[in-house]
Amino acid sequence: MSEWTDVATLDELWEGDIRAVTVGAELILLAHLPGGEVRAYQGECPHSRFPLASGELAGDVLTCAGHGWEFDLRTGQGVNPGNCSLQAFPIRVAGEQISVSISGVRA
């Protein structure tokens, strides 16, 4: 697998949206945050392995639909509870194309 995998375009992931994509065997959560920043994190909640793309994004905070855990998607840090975090994946945006790398990263 190449280091970078094209996963979506900015036209497919509008500002304020989240979506799940798969890269290799990894489920990845893409988030296009208010202000235009695009981030990629592990796609399952560390608490219950519930798919994070089923959650609700309010500003920068994602609430897991499984048990209500909250994450700051600018940093991946847990908000409630604060003692957890999401594994981030390297991401790049070239023109309209969003690409993610899972090389050397373990979720």
Image (cartoon, helix red, strand yellow):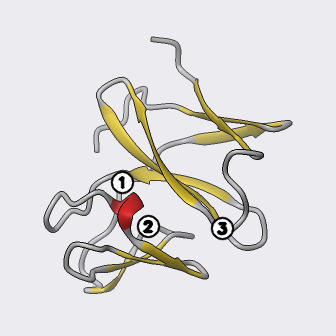
Q: Secondary structure at mark 3?
A: loop
Mark 3 surroundings within 10 Å by alpha-carbon count, few (fewer than 14), some (14 through 19), many (20 or more) = many
Q: Earlier in the sequence, mark 3 or mark 1?
A: 3
**Measured Cα–Cα span from mark 3 to mark 1:** 17 Å
Q: Which residue is mark 3?
A: 33
Residue toward you, 29 or 104: 29
**Measured Cα–Cα span from mark 2 to mark 1:** 7 Å
Count the marks: how many?
A: 3
Q: Earlier in the sequence, mark 2 or mark 1?
A: 2
Looking at the image, do the residues carrying marks 2 and 1 touch, with CB atoms under 8 Å apart? yes
**Measured Cα–Cα span from mark 3 to mark 2:** 12 Å
Q: Which residue is mark 1?
A: 87
Q: Which residue is mark 2?
A: 76
Quarter of the picture containing the N terminus is top left
Indicate the amino acid at tag 3. Leu
Residue toward you, 46 or 51: 51
Left or right: 88, with 46 as reference point: right
Left or right: 45, with 73 as reference point: left
Left or right: 41, with 60 as reference point: left
Q: Secondary structure at mark 1?
A: loop
